[in-house]
Amino acid sequence: MTALALQLLQMVLVLAAAPLLTGVVRKVKARLVGRRGPSPLQPYRDLLRLLRKEAVVAENASWLFRVAPYLVFAALWLAASLVPTFTTGLLLQPTADLIALVALLASARFMTALAGLDIGTSFGGIGSSRDMMIASLAEPAMLLVIFTVSIVAGSTALASVADYMREAEVGLRVSLAMALVALIMVALAENARIPVDNPATHLELTMVHEAMVLEYSGRHLALIEAAAMLKLLFYISLIACIFAPWGLAAPGEGAAVAAFALTAWSAKLLLGAIALAVLETSIAKMRVFRVSEFLGGALLLGLLAVIFLYVSRGI
Amino acid sequence: MLASILIALVPLLALGPASLVAPRAPAARIAVYGGTAILAGAIGLIAAAHLVTGSAPEAAGLPLGLPWLTARFRLDALSAFFLMIANGGAAAASIYGIGYGKHEAEPERVIPAFPLFLAAIDLTLLADDAFSFLLSWETMSVTSWALVLATHREPDTLRAAQLYLVMASGGTLLLLMAFGVLAQLAGAYDFESIRSATPAPAAAVLALVLAFLGTGSKAGLVPLHAWLPLAHPAAPSHVSALMSGVMTKVALYAMVRITFDLVGSVPWWWGGVMMAVGGITAVVGVLFAIVEQDLKRLLAYSTVENIGIVVTALGLAAAFRDNGMPEIAGLAFAAALLHALNHAVFKSLLFLGAGAIATATGARDLGRLGGLIGRMPQTAFAMLVGAGAIAALPPLNGFVSEWLLFQAVLKGPLLPQWELKIAAAVIAALLALAAALAATCFVRAFGIAFLGRPRSPEAAAASEVEPSMRWTLLVLAGLCLALGILPMLGLMPMTRLGEAVIGAAAVPPEARSWIWLTPPAAGGNSYGGIVVLIVITVFAVMTRIGIHSLASHRLRRAKPWACGFDAPVHAAQYSASSFAQPVRRVFAGLVRAEERVDMPEPGDLRPAHFAASWRDASWDFFYNPIGAAVGWLSLTLNQLQFLTIRKYLSLMFAALVGLLFLVAVTQ
Amino acid sequence: MKDLYFDTAHMLGAAVLLLSFALLFQRRLSGVINTFAAQAVVLAMAAAWQGFVQGAPHLYITALVALVFKAVAIPVALHRIVRLLMIHRTVETALSIGLTMVVGVALVTLAILLVLPVTSDSAALTRENLALALSVVLLGLLTMITRRNAVTQVIGFMSLENGLILAAVGVSGMPLVVEMSVAFAVMVAFIIFGIFFFQIRERFDTLDLHYLESFRGERS
């Protein structure tokens, strides 16, 4: 029963927090470059505005174009609801297998990329093509990170990983540090952040993710944007849950622990947002075809992480 | 059960010759394909029953073939599993053929060979001695070669068929040599004696290498795959489906039979070799699939990829088994076989779908397709499911076998050998890369063929194909989903198979659950396909309800944004070639990509030209050097034809003395 | 607590290794020099940390040497040279960057495979350190052979030296003399190479060794 309640709470919480997280990143970025920037609440207003507008759909759009936003949003919402953000005692926790999570995100991307091709304009095509290329390199890097983590923790179930990382004497490990760096690189690419893509650009030729969803408007665009916000939340929570699981409440612990865990999670999200903003302000976007080197680097770093695991103690 | 299968094979063998009475008559088509479908369905069901009931192996000897040999046949769990795959795929292809055959230009070239091809496949799977195995194997090669030649009026077919014949003969020769090595040690050609004999390590390795190359060339392992993307697509689509979906599985069966059953003791490093070859095959195959422009050839390259995945899993199983970890070996083995089954389902679906597209539009080139989702909605839906399955997306079946395989690879660090520990990490990276690239490949294949605007008048005028074809596609798509959400459907028949071949089943009966897939060897990790399906459906429905109650319902249709151009031209869409450009650039070295831009000077009025091309690297790195070496050798040896008689005599003398010396030394 | 000491040492060693990869990844000469400086800073931290853990004050001097010469003096001088000679242009690679990285990872794997059996009886602590140091040395060599530009070659050489020092500070009881001589060797090498640059510049008007080869008749 509590598991169900906690699960529902998490589903609501991630939905509520995702736009705020994006808003905070934008605000901090604005402050860093000396602008005042919009209020962190602006994303909520944007989403509401989009929901109220009529949806304009291209004449030749198929059913796939209209179904995709719902599926993408559902997949990302599910993914974000599965990560142990403040407690490991969620109802759907058994489904939170890391490999299945990666595949869930891949399904969402598959649908978005197909929707990008549906209208038959160049923008959608260029976006889909590049997004899939980026994902093709990011996914194996992600899997090697999972490989490292699961060898250390002995499981690919996210809750067990979090429990292990919190309780066992893991210590500082070269492999885990490398895996963390690789995961951050993957997260930057997957979330279409600088240096891989620019979430703020609306110059057609420099954008990847934004180009892919260019034809969306109204409620469909709201869903797509919310899904992107959920994805950011998902990745920051995932990194926090694996590499900084401190403060997570175990199932059956009291309300006070859960409340503390919620605070800890908010603090982690805030820190992640600030770190992301600082990173994005301090580096420049790279050319599209250097992205392969960047992600290839992440892939090799993941490989190094696994290999160093063998030399380090205790394995 | 073996007897009933053998009895069912008699009418199957008779169907082909019988159809020669009136091969062009529609009745012949319906009789042959209908008959094949019924017989294949029956054989498949018998095989499935054999697996599910857990019956003991059955053997039979028939007085066929050479006078002093009896042809032996045997039905055990391994052959029953592959019989189930093969006949299931064949039944689907046959039902599809009833409708598809109507559009055939020269049905008399397809109909007689089709049942023979299937019969040869079944006999190969049942054979229990080297002689009947090789005879059936070669019959399978020759009948499929004849089926490839059915489209002999198309320009590329002749080259494809010639290459296929050469490669198939070479493969059979290698298998013959492998059996020769094994039989020489066992003293007999029947599998029973070979199985019970324990070959010396060196001889076992020699047999393993020969058998791996022989079966690998049929299955399409890089670099022996070059014939496959030419020959598979050249045949009519239902035959392509059989060749890619089923015949490659027969090659895998032969690989498993010889490696794990007949030779028995596989050294761990051979498992490592299989993993390496499999991993490279997977990545290289999918890379070529991504840059390929022809839909059916793209599918054939993707077959190469999937064979690579299966062989990697088999290698992993061999490595774990040799190191005394049968549970994990069983997990890897189950991943391999489940992937073989899944691949048979979705590759048949995709090839048959490509056939439906070819029937409706007359085109296989992605550059001439587009926008078919509106004109062929049911085909499009089935193909979308197939694309998702092959891209390993949950909750479809491709993901289940990938998940099992990753669970086995994740156990790689438990292996004692350092080489294998590190190989496991590299293999994990390669497999993940292959899976992610497969998603890219099928976004491209589906997106360019079915989405966007029609790229040719034929695509614009396409219409849905007839019911027998459509329903086959939809049933196969349903199977993709069923095997994805209820993985036990595929794993349950495998229980005894794993115990018999490897020593442990991935999911022993006590761990069996229809909801959660929890192989004990995976250490508590679980995947619930049906749970994922239900949960994602619930989330999507909640989203839908939420949006419906919150958001505006208004919807307006408008022209798409094309930078201000009023009438969007179909040629301004992203094309198959441009979609592949990022991958072509990133992996330029492997796909031998070249882009040539011919840009006129300012003021020059001729149009600019852009040409992108790529080549299969196996030609550059493997076949052409071999060809050049053979050519050089022939030229060099050619001089032998122009010697004086005295020199010929001295050569013969030298040979004689050499042989005598050899005899003297060895005695 | 003892674990944490060693973990931190390994972490710093890993950072040196990652910066070696970063050296391979850089395309601009100034980026290469800055990465090298960063590597020297981390190396100094590693040496200082080892000095603290082992209670060996002479390692602080090694750290200081690394910090002053390698992290400050040499990069500043190299920046000067780059500015003087106006060779800001991109680094010319003999092998594509992606491929170099793959070779790099293969070399690290090789280093680990080499170190493992040799140190099978010693503790995991030393062997991780040795594996890291050997990897840095091999990557330094790789930098030298895959980059055409002379400045990059010098940096590759010094990065190789960094690997040697990393190995030396990891083993307790290494006398200070050795480190000083290593540092001086690097200085000498630097001076020689510095003179060398100007020589090449005067003669051939470029720092690309490619031209030197054609002068010697190795290339047409």
Image: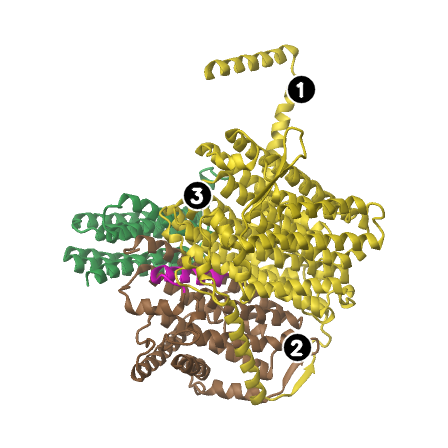
Chain colours: A brown, B yellow, C green
Q: Is mark 3 on a helix, strand or loop?
A: helix
Q: Mark 2 lies on which chain?
A: B
Kind of residue at disc 3 = Leu
Task: Calculate the distance from the C-alpha at mark 1 to the C-alpha at mark 3.
Answer: 51 Å
Same subunit, tags 2 and 3: no
Residue under circle 1?
A: B641
Residue B206 position in % (x across, y down)? 50, 34
The dominant secondary structure in magenta is helix
User: In front: B191, or B377?
Assistant: B191
Residue under circle 3?
A: C212
Kind of residue at disc 1 = Gln
In which quarter of the view is residue A16 placed? Answer: bottom left
Left or right: residue B253 versus residue B568 is left
Q: Is mark 2 on a helix, strand or loop?
A: loop
Which residues are drawn in magenta? Answer: A137-156
User: In front: B416, or B187?
Assistant: B187
Residue B607 visible in the snapshot: no
Q: Which residue is drawn at 50% across and 88% down?
A: A45
